[in-house]
Amino acid sequence: SQQGEEDPQALSIQEGENATMNCSYKTSINNLQWYRQNSGRGLVHLILIRSNEREKHSGRLRVTLDTSKKSSSLLITASRAADTASYFCATDGTSGSRLTFGEGTQLTVNP
Amino acid sequence: KAGVTQTPRYLIKTRGQQVTLSCSPISGHRSVSWYQQTPGQGLQFLFEYFSETQRNKGNFPGRFSGRQFSNSRSEMNVSTLELGDSALYLCASSSGQVPYIQYFGAGTRLSVL
């Protein structure tokens, strides 16, 4: 089964609003990554946070990690229509180089 | 640098046939991973090859196999195709070292009729 679970499954917002997606995982991790996938295409790496980090920023992206709760959140600020995509968290850990992906959040940003 | 290239982009096969998908990783990357993506099951890990050796394997039947060549290019083979094998197959390359950031190809859309 998937290690990561994300919520919400789908999120619809207006341009300019912030979007927050959450990811929970089950086992210890070394790193947690977030990826974006435009419809029917490959995934694109967005940001990585290490297990000893609590927060990380990259442009309009902010990622937090709470290892005690085994959860992470991705915040996209001032969203744009071009941010419409599915967002996945991915963890590595006991399986070494194998990444385990969450089920994804489908984000729709309405112009 | 050129990105990850997957061929073909689209494929239509019938039940019982076999199929081979190809993936050319980013130059210098030694690891190639394969994933199956379906609406019902999400993104499922198939296997990872590193320096021509299978390093990790997911929970798929033996009909799914792969290999990696000395130039790091990889192929995935599915034999005796079933309707449920219809999916988007994604290949990702990485350096193979921590923190295992993966670079994905555009995928091969396989339809089994």
Image: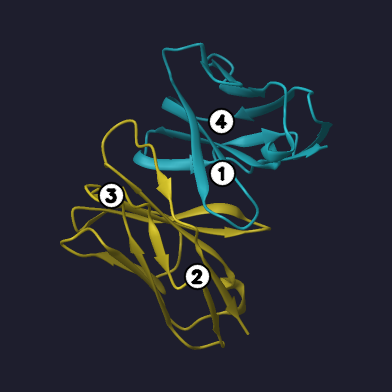
Chain colours: A cyan, B yellow
Please rate how many residues cluster around mark 3, counting C-alpha atoms within 10 Å: few if below 14, some from 14 to 19, many from 20. many
Dot 3 or dot 2: first in sequence order is 2
**Residue B55: x, y in percent?**
27, 51
Q: Nearer the viewer, residue B98 or B60?
A: B98
Q: Amino acid at mark 1?
A: Gln
The residue to which callout 2 is attached is B9
The residue sitting at 31% across, 55% down in the picture is: B25
Evaluate whether label 3 is on the same chain as label 4: no
Q: Chain of mark 2?
A: B
In the image, taking residue B85 as reference, residue A6 lies left or right, namely: right
Indicate which label's residue lies in the foreground, 3 or 4: 3
Indicate which label's residue lies in the foreground, 2 or 4: 2
In the image, taking residue B95 as reference, residue A92 lies left or right, namely: right
Q: Chain of mark 1?
A: A
Q: CA distance from mark 2 to mark 4?
A: 32 Å
Q: Chain of mark 3?
A: B
Please rate how many residues cluster around mark 1, counting C-alpha atoms within 10 Å: few if below 14, some from 14 to 19, many from 20. some
Disc 4 to disc 1: CB gap under 8 Å: no
Q: Secondary structure beneath disc 4? A: loop
Give the vertical position of B3 relative to B113 (above or below).
above
In the image, taking residue B78 as reference, residue A21 lies left or right, namely: right
The residue to which callout 3 is attached is B31
Q: Which mark is residue A25?
A: 4
Residue B56 seen in the figure = no
Q: CA distance from mark 3 to mark 2?
A: 21 Å
Evaluate whether label 2 is on the same chain as label 1: no
Q: Amino acid at mark 3?
A: Ser
**Residue B12: x, y in percent?**
56, 82
The residue sitting at 52% across, 47% down in the picture is: A43
